[in-house]
Amino acid sequence: MTTLHAPPRPPTAVERTRGALEAALADTTPVDLSWIDPPPAPDGWTLAADALRFLTRLVAHMRPGHVLEFGSGLSTRALARACAALAPPGAVSSIDHDPEFGAIAARALADTPVPGGRVAVQIAPLVARDYGGKLVPVYHLDAARFASPRPVDLVVVDGPTVVLGGREGTLYQALQFARPGTLLVLDDADRA
């Protein structure tokens, strides 16, 4: 008598993402941040060095085709470098409400371009939108100006600041671009 075994089921998008997250958290491979000059200041505005190392490891394990970032800056450069190291390279769409910070991020990318990097920095003012009967700030962005038309695999939320209404609306907005398997990383999640 012959027993037939069903072929193993391929992992779902959610299972693949969960595995990549677990691998990134367990990864202790050193991440070179020597290119950052000056080093990240512990002022709360820039992602800390440990967060930049984690994002770099996460991109290496997750291999996102498209990263959407809310709040541009040093993290944009770190994500661009990590995504450019992939084969094929991933794209980074960075959104900032502040023209000054957005311009600084765009200038830094222009001054030290990442070979193979596809990055788009978009200035998108904050506007109030109703989510569940509550007005919250969201970015008035144009998805046609993203670095890639591909679906978003990874979302990094590092804005807006609490004095401008916080990140609740950004979380709702990020869901518009999410699909099964999309991972959302929220910086400063322990803040009110």
Image (cartoon, rainbow, N blue to C red):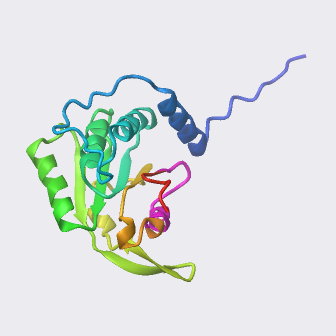
| In the image, farthest residue toward the right | 1
Residue depicted at x 43% and y 53%: 188
Residue depicted at x 54% and y 48%: 181
| Depth check, front residue: 185 or 6 | 185
Residue depicted at x 19% and y 53%: 105
Tell me where residue 186 appears, x and y as whole percent: 45, 53
Q: Is residue 156 magenta?
A: no
Tell me where residue 4 appears, x and y as whole percent: 80, 24
Image-based side of 49 in relation to 131, left or right: left
- Quarter of the image with the N terminus is top right
Tell me where residue 180 appears, x and y as whole percent: 56, 52
| Depth check, front residue: 8 or 51 | 51
Image-based side of 185 in relation to 107, left or right: right
- Above or below residue 183? Residue 11 is above
Residue depicted at x 50% and y 33%: 25
Q: Is residue 176 magenta?
A: yes
User: Within the image, what quadrant is residue 165 found in?
Assistant: bottom left
| In the image, farthest residue toward the top | 1
| Depth check, front residue: 3 or 189 | 189
Tell me where residue 98 appears, x and y as whole percent: 23, 67
> So how many labels did they put on this image?
0
User: Within the image, what quadrant is residue 115 found in?
Assistant: top left
Image-based side of 68 in relation to 25, left or right: left
Magenta stretch in the rendered image: 170-184
| In the image, farthest residue toward the front | 43
User: Within the image, what quadrant is residue 102 found in?
Assistant: bottom left
